[in-house]
Image (cartoon, rainbow, N blue to C red):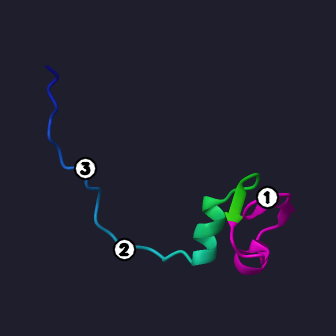
């Protein structure tokens, strides 16, 4: 049976820092080369930024992030 030492994993307390915008979070979650599926026909680049290319699809709108 393994022994696990219980420790406090909390780091030092400090200021929270800036809150990232929705655009920043979206672009970090969808790096270049990722594929984004949506039911909206709008290019995600107009909403979140980045460069997106539409891909052929039989289902939802499919976008590939190119830059």
Disc 1 or 2, which lies upstream in sequence?
2
Image quarter (top left, top right, bottom left or bottom right) of the N terminus? top left
In the picture, the disc for residue 17 is none
Residue under pointer 2: 15
The percent position of residue 19, horizontal first and vertical second, equals 48, 77
Q: Which residues are magenta?
A: 38-67
Does the magenta segment cover residue 61? yes
Does the magenta segment cover residue 36? no
The residue that appears at 66% across and 59% down in the rendered structure is 30
Name the secondary structure under disc 2. loop
Residue under pointer 1: 58
Disc 1 or 3, which lies upstream in sequence?
3
The residue that appears at 72% across and 53% down in the rendered structure is 34
- Closer to the eye: label 3 or 2: 3
Which of the 4 quarters of the picture holds residue 6? Answer: top left
Number of callouts: 3
- Closer to the eye: label 1 or 2: 1
Q: Viewer-proximal residue, 1 or 53?
A: 53
Residue 30 relative to residue 20: left or right: right
Residue 10 relative to residue 5: left or right: right
Residue under pointer 3: 9
Residue 24 relative to residue 4: left or right: right
């Amino acid at each position: 049976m393994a022994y696990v030492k219980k420790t406090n994993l909390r780091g030092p307390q400090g200021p929270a820092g800036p809150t990232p915008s929705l655009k920043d979070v979206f672009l970090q979650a969808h790096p270049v080369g990722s594929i984004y599926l949506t039911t909206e026909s709008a290019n995600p680049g107009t909403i979140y930024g980045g460069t997106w290319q539409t891909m052929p699809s039989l289902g939802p709108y499919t976008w590939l992030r190119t830059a």
